[in-house]
Each structure stands twice: as structure tokens, then as C-alpha cells.
Image (spheres, rainbow, N blue to C red):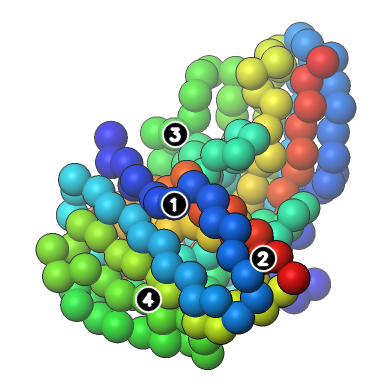
Amino acid sequence: GQQLNQSPQSMFIQEGEDVSMNCTSSSIFNTWLWYKQDPGEGPVLLIALYKAGELTSNGRLTAQFGITRKDSFLNISASIPSDVGIYFCAALIQGAQKLVFGQGTRLTINP
Amino acid sequence: GAGVSQSPSNKVTEKGKDVELRCDPISGHTALYWYRQSLGQGLEFLIYFQGNSAPDKSGLPSDRFSAERTGGSVSTLTIQRTQQEDSAVYLCASSLRSGERGTQYFGPGTRLLVL
């Protein structure tokens, strides 16, 4: 089945640094999504991408839908303590309703 | 409530027992999804309901797993004869509509531990 390869698995950064993570797949998708999950909570949608090449920002977050439709990246600028958590990419197969998820990137910020 | 709610938040059970997990979607959302998240892993699709259509059960791992959605709203995920490998967080999501623009909103999950 379709799989998303998300990297890195974990990141340890200093407050104020920029962060970059990405997801790749051998399959083509029509929608890419980025979620953040805090401990004990369900994932919360950060950014949704619907067109190849689309670049979308949400505050300090920027995400892009790859031209090949097989990848996406998420950047976080000027990280702050509340950015700590696990970030998941997810993608929707054309004509299907279920999301495929990456394995997650755990972000830790050193004060 | 404003969001997706799930109950119980935590469930500890003995191997071989049946469990029922409940999901209350956002009012008016026609699509409802169940996912499973094992420790340190991403989410794994289990089942999807859309209106009165037959559910997509393609993600259910075995016939011990079943789900129903009554009246197009509340859903129950049932696991019969639980096994230790069933231990995971079970997440429910709902969306206003299905398809590519149907943003899925997740509940907080039910943490299931099978001893």
C-alpha cells in the first residue's frame, strides 16, 4: 500500500532556530496535510495543500506540495517553546477518503 | 461540544475481553473515521463512514474489529477477544464532507491497554 517516509524522526533544536521536515512517497497524492499532535491529544491540522507546487503559509509555518505530487515539506521559522510536539504529514489518495500518515517528527526545543 | 469527543479516555482490559470505544463527531459532520496509533507510530486507517453509504472497512486488521454508526452520528468501535497487540490509541475523526477538501478533525483518542 501507499507509504509516506517522513524525516527526520526527531529534532533537537534551540529556541529561535528554524525547522524543516519532509515527507516523500513513491505514490502520487492529490492532497497533502500537516498535523501537530501534543501529548494526550489528537492531531490538529496545521496546513492543507491541494495543488502541486502550492506553497502555503500559516503564521511561522510554511508548507509546500511538491511538483511531482510525491512529496511535501514543512518549515517552522523562529521556533518557540510551544512548537514542541510531534508533527505528522498525511496524504489523501485520489478518489479515496482515508488518510495515509507519515511516522512523525518529534520536535524538542532546548531553552 | 465544539469538537470530536471520545470515551473512555483510557481503558485497561484483560486479554480475551471485549471492549467498546465511543466517538461523538462534530455536529453536522457527515463523514466519520477511525484510526489506530501504536506507540511512537503514525496513524493507521481502520474504517470510514459517509452518510448512509456502506462503510469502508478496508483497514480493519481482523474480524475481531467492527464498528457501527447509529443515526449518522455517534459511532462505536468494538474489539472482541482483545489481544495484547491491540494496545494502542484509537482516534476518531470527522469531517463536514468526504473527499479531498474534507478536512478531518480528530478527537483526543482512547488509550487502550490490554494486559
Tell which circle, 4 or 2, labels the residue nearer the N-terminal end: 4
The three-letter code of the residue at mark 1 reads: Pro
Q: Residue at x 15, y 70 (%)?
A: A67
What residue did someone put label 4 on? Answer: A63
Above or below: residue A16 compared with residue B103 = below
Gap in Å between the C-alphas at discs 3 and 4?
A: 28 Å
The three-letter code of the residue at mark 3 reads: Gly
Tell which circle, 4 or 1, labels the residue nearer the N-terminal end: 1
Q: Which mark is residue B59?
A: 3
User: Could you tell me residue B50's position as x and y percent?
Assistant: 46, 56
What residue did someone put label 2 on? Answer: A109
The three-letter code of the residue at mark 4 reads: Ala
Q: In the image as oriented, which residue stretches furthest toward the top?
A: B16
User: Is residue A48 or residue A9 the one in the foreground?
Assistant: A9
Give the letter of the chain under mark 2. Answer: A
Question: Residue A45, located in which quarter of the rendered image?
Answer: bottom right
Tell which circle, 2 or 1, labels the residue nearer the N-terminal end: 1
User: Do marks 4 and 1 share a chain?
Assistant: yes
Q: Secondary structure at mark 4?
A: strand
Gap in Å between the C-alphas at discs 2 and 3?
A: 35 Å
Specify few, some or many for label 2: CA neighbours under 10 Å numbering under 14, 14-19, or 20 or more.
Answer: some
User: Could you tell me residue B61's position as x and y percent?
Assistant: 49, 24
What residue did someone put label 1 on? Answer: A8
User: Do marks 2 and 1 share a chain?
Assistant: yes
Give the position of the N terminus of chain B as an image quadrant.
bottom right
User: Is residue A46 or residue B114 the one in the foreground?
Assistant: A46
